[in-house]
Image: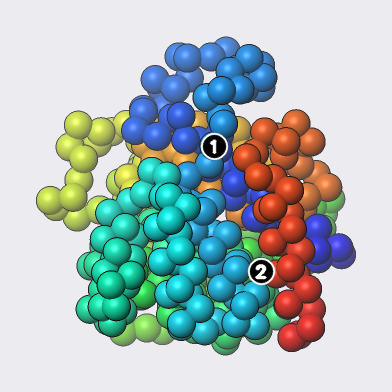
């Protein structure tokens, strides 16, 4: 298995999913599908719509840089990389990240800076942790939690980060020509957050089990079912109940991303197109699902025109390679 190819595939997957999903953020899935008949042609004809990625990719790259500089998780490196993001400047930033990182910039200790957000802002940037720690599952869990609570103190955000990092670690050494066991995939990600005292983590496991037993439903029906799963009053988006419109809550976004990834295991392209057009928080579903798809299919199975569509794609490949080299020396 070419592990470097998987590292590059996963981070490129984040960037492609984010770039393709960005124009559709805040739109219903039905609305998105009324815009084009063939998504591939639409991308080629409307390249201007896809000229940038957003905060998901920006923070993923900063996470990778922090791991490279620290040879693994180091609190100060993470804080300084996230603070650097404010000068990128942030594109389409979510509340949880921007409010907490602004406080970190002014020296507020992270325990006080973190917002109580349970949003998807930490799962969307976790791919480098899943890659770097794929052979060290204890380290993976610890780094996923520590990197998450820096900005989001809500337990749903840490659980979502662990689940996605663990899923990436599972997929990285799977051969895309040989289908993996979906049952085993669920066992692995569920046990990554099992036996905890957190009520929300128990709820997350229930949602994952619900997903597992509903994989046969159509994509539209599944998204309608899972778009706001776990979301509590008053955070429901009432107008979108009963629609395919993925809520930015950590649990609903992760469930929908895994759902679409598992529904479209035919190719990277099929998978990423479905993810980026999910509806609702489309860029983040694209980024999270793209991290999984890229870790599974690897860079060599990503079409060149999709890679070249991404802003700074050479820089992303280079950072992925540096992350791989750091991993290789350490493990
Ligand atoms: Mg975004």
Q: Is mark 1 within 8 Å of ligand 1?
A: no
Disc 1 + disc 2, Cβ < 8 Å? no
74 relative to 246 in the view: left or right: right
Q: Residue 125: give x, y in percent of width and height.
A: 50, 60
Under circle 2, the secondary element is helix
In the image, residue 228 above or below residue 42: below
Q: Residue at x 49, y 69 (%)?
A: 81
In the image, residue 110 above or below residue 229: below
Q: Earlier in the sequence, mark 1 or mark 2?
A: 1
Q: Residue at x 50, y 35 (%)?
A: 21
Q: CA distance from mark 1 to mark 2?
A: 24 Å
Q: Residue 85: give x, y in percent of width and height.
A: 45, 59
Quarter of the figure with the C terminus: bottom right
How many marks do you count on the picture? 2
The answer to whether any part of residue 28 appears in the image is yes
Q: Residue 137: give x, y in percent of width and height.
A: 61, 82
296 relative to 59 in the view: left or right: right
Q: Which dot marks residue 52?
A: 1
Question: Mark 2 — residue?
Answer: 131
Tag in front: 1 or 2: 1
In the image, residue 220 above or below residue 229: above
Quarter of the figure with the N terminus: bottom right
- In the image, 130 versus 44, the foreground residue is 44
Q: Is mark 2 within 8 Å of ligand 1?
A: no
- In the image, 189 versus 132, the foreground residue is 132
Under circle 1, the secondary element is loop
Q: Residue at x 19, y 55 (%)?
A: 232
């Amino acid at each position: 298995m070419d592990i470097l190819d998987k590292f590059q595939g996963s981070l490129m997957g984040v960037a492609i999913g984010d770039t393709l999903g960005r124009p559709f953020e805040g739109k219903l899935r039905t609305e998105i599908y009324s815009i084009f008949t063939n998504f591939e042609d639409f991308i080629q004809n409307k390249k201007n719509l896809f000229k940038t990625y957003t905060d998901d990719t920006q923070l993923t790259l900063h996470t990778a840089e922090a791991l490279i500089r620290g040879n693994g998780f180091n609190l100060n490196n993470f804080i300084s990389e996230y603070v650097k993001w404010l000068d990128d400047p942030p594109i389409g930033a979510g509340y949880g990240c921007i409010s907490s990182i602004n406080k970190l910039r002014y020296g507020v200790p992270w325990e006080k800076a973190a917002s109580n957000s349970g949003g998807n802002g930490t799962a969307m940037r976790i791919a480098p942790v899943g890659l770097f720690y794929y052979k060290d599952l204890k380290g993976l869990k610890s780094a996923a939690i520590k990197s998450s609570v820096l900005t989001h103190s809500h337990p749903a955000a840490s659980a979502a980060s662990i689940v996605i990092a663990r899923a990436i670690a599972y997929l990285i050494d799977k051969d895309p020509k040989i289908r993996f066991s979906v049952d085993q995939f669920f066992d692995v990600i569920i046990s990554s957050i099992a036996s905890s005292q957190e009520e929300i983590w128990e709820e997350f496991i229930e949602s994952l089990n619900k997903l597992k037993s509903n994989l046969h439903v159509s994509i539209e029906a599944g998204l309608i079912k899972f778009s706001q799963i776990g979301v509590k009053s008053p955070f429901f988006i009432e107008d979108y109940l009963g629609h395919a419109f993925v809520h930015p809550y950590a649990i609903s976004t992760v469930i929908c991303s895994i759902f679409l990834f598992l529904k479209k295991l035919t190719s990277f392209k099929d998978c990423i197109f479905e993810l980026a057009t999910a509806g609702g928080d489309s860029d983040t579903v694209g980024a999270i699902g793209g991290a999984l798809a890229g870790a599974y299919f690897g860079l060599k199975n990503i079409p060149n025109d999709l890679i070249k569509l991404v802003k700074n794609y050479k820089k992303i490949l280079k950072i992925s390679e540096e992350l791989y080299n750091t991993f290789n020396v350490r493990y």
